[in-house]
Amino acid sequence: MAGSHHNVAKTALLFATLWALLLAVAWMAGGGTGRFLWLSASVGLALTAYSLWNSDKIAIRAMRARPVSELEQPVMYQAVRELSTAARQPMPRLYVSPTMAPNAFATGRSPTNAAVCCTEGILQLLDARELRGVLGHELAHVHNRDTLSSSVAAAVAAMITAVVQFLLLFTTGSGRRPLNPVAALATVVLAPMAAMTIQMAISRTREYDADATAVDLTADPLALADALRKIDTAAQARPLPADQQLIDVSHLMIANPFADAGLSRLFATHPPMDDRIARLEAMAPRR
């Protein structure tokens, strides 16, 4: 499938960088000794494992989604079944979130453990053809193992933030030597920013790849382009609240669910919607 060939190498490089940042922050937090380094690595591995194993449950719970039957959502089931069969992949579990903000996401550590969720808002906003394009995009994330990579990246980035918070709490206590200003700046400011930037790079790259893979599956780039245009307009008119649970899973969604303004653009996990739509329109056969 398009977009899947380079994902493994890119993700491995980005993960290696994230773990290098984690260990570097832990080393500085320990004053140049290995004591805190091993503690951070152990906790980081445990957190990553937990996030991987429960990634589907975490995202579904954050969106208050519920499983739906084919009787309830026949159009959704038909599209997912057809596309999964065409890709020779297992059919994921299907969920619907009660929120009226239009969005969709896929989650799960593997294709056999995957779930795809649509909001009530997107089901009301899109026609069957546009919804098929969106579902093709979400299935592409599952088939390309993007849901796995994003879960690990989020877990390691969260671990770096936790190490920094630990550093702020315990490096200024009695009997401890404070970090020099350069090390403190790198640890408290630059490391979390770098982790967030790397996580953003993983997310932006996979969105382009998932769009291309969806076109391979549906053979209808304009359906997804039209859907994205509608979703972007409606999502900006009705953004999700900046709740921490929703922030933690927002990188999974097909479009940025929050108000697109200020510094949020700089650290957005999604590429510019206009750029995605232009790329999809360029894939359409010329008449």
Image (spheres, rainbow, N blue to C red):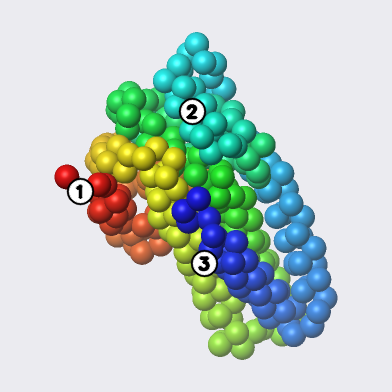
Instruction: Say above or below: 67 vs 61.
Output: above
Quarter holding the C terminus is top left
Give whichever of 227, 153 is nearer the camera: 227
Q: Amino acid at mark 3?
A: Ile
Count neighbours of disc 1 (C-alpha within 10 A) and say few if under 14, some if 14 to 19, many if 20 or more: few
Count neighbours of disc 3 (C-alpha within 10 A) and say few if under 14, some if 14 to 19, many if 20 or more: many
Residue 242 in sight from this viewpoint: no
Residue at the spot of label 3? 198
Q: What residue lies at 59% left-to-right and 67% top-to-bottom?
A: 9
Residue at the spot of label 2? 82
The residues bearing labels 3 and 1 have C-alpha atoms spaced at a distance of 37 Å
The residues bearing labels 2 and 1 have C-alpha atoms spaced at a distance of 26 Å
Q: What residue lies at 46% left-to-right and 22% top-to-bottom?
A: 78
Q: Position of residue 179 (x, y in %)?
A: 65, 84
Name the mark on residue 286. 1
Q: Position of residue 196 (x, y in %)?
A: 51, 64
Looking at the image, the residue that sits furthest to the left is 287
The residues bearing labels 3 and 2 have C-alpha atoms spaced at a distance of 34 Å
Circles 3 and 1: CB atoms closer than 8 Å: no
Q: Is residue 287 left or right of residue 20?
A: left
Q: Which one is earlier in the sequence, the residue at label 3 or at label 2? A: 2
Question: Is label 2 or label 1 in front?
Answer: 1
Q: Which one is earlier in the sequence, the residue at label 2 or at label 1? A: 2
Name the mark on residue 101. none
Circles 3 and 2: CB atoms closer than 8 Å: no
Q: What residue lies at 79% left-to-right and 83% top-to-bottom?
A: 33
Residue 174 lies in quadrant: bottom right
Q: Secondary structure at mark 3?
A: helix
